[in-house]
Amino acid sequence: MMTDPSPSLDADLVDHHGYRIRLSPSGLDWITLVSWPDRQPTLIMAPERETALVKAREWIYHQLASDKTPQ
């Protein structure tokens, strides 16, 4: 039996650099909730699942870069 290495479209939870990304279809769009302990969650919407996931990861990289910037 062969397995598909790509993530399942039914998968709705992804961990990325300590952040949790929850993906949910909503009508014609995908809603992505990005959360991290002790921080307010962020909501991201996109027309496709992969676009929502890319936007969430970009937001996480921006947050990580901001945390490293001296105040």
Image: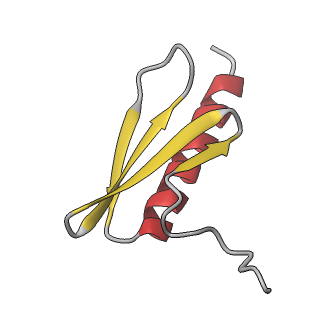
Q: How many marks?
A: 0
Percent position of residue 56, x then y = 50, 50
**Vertically, is 22 above or below 3?**
above
Quarter of the view holding residue 4? bottom right
Quarter containing the N terminus: bottom right
Q: Residue furthest right?
A: 1
Looking at the image, which residue is at 65% across and 43% down?
15
* Residue with the most extreme left position: 27
How did the renderer colour the structure?
Answer: secondary structure
Which quadrant: the C terminus? top right
The image shows residue 33 at horizontal and vertical percentages of 41, 41
Horizontally, residue 12 falls left or right of residue 16, namely left
Instruction: Tell me residue 18's x, y (percent).
Output: 68, 32
Q: Residue at x 53, y 13 (%)?
A: 38
Residue 40 versus residue 29 in the image, above or below: above
Q: As drawn, which residue projects farthest toward the bottom?
A: 1
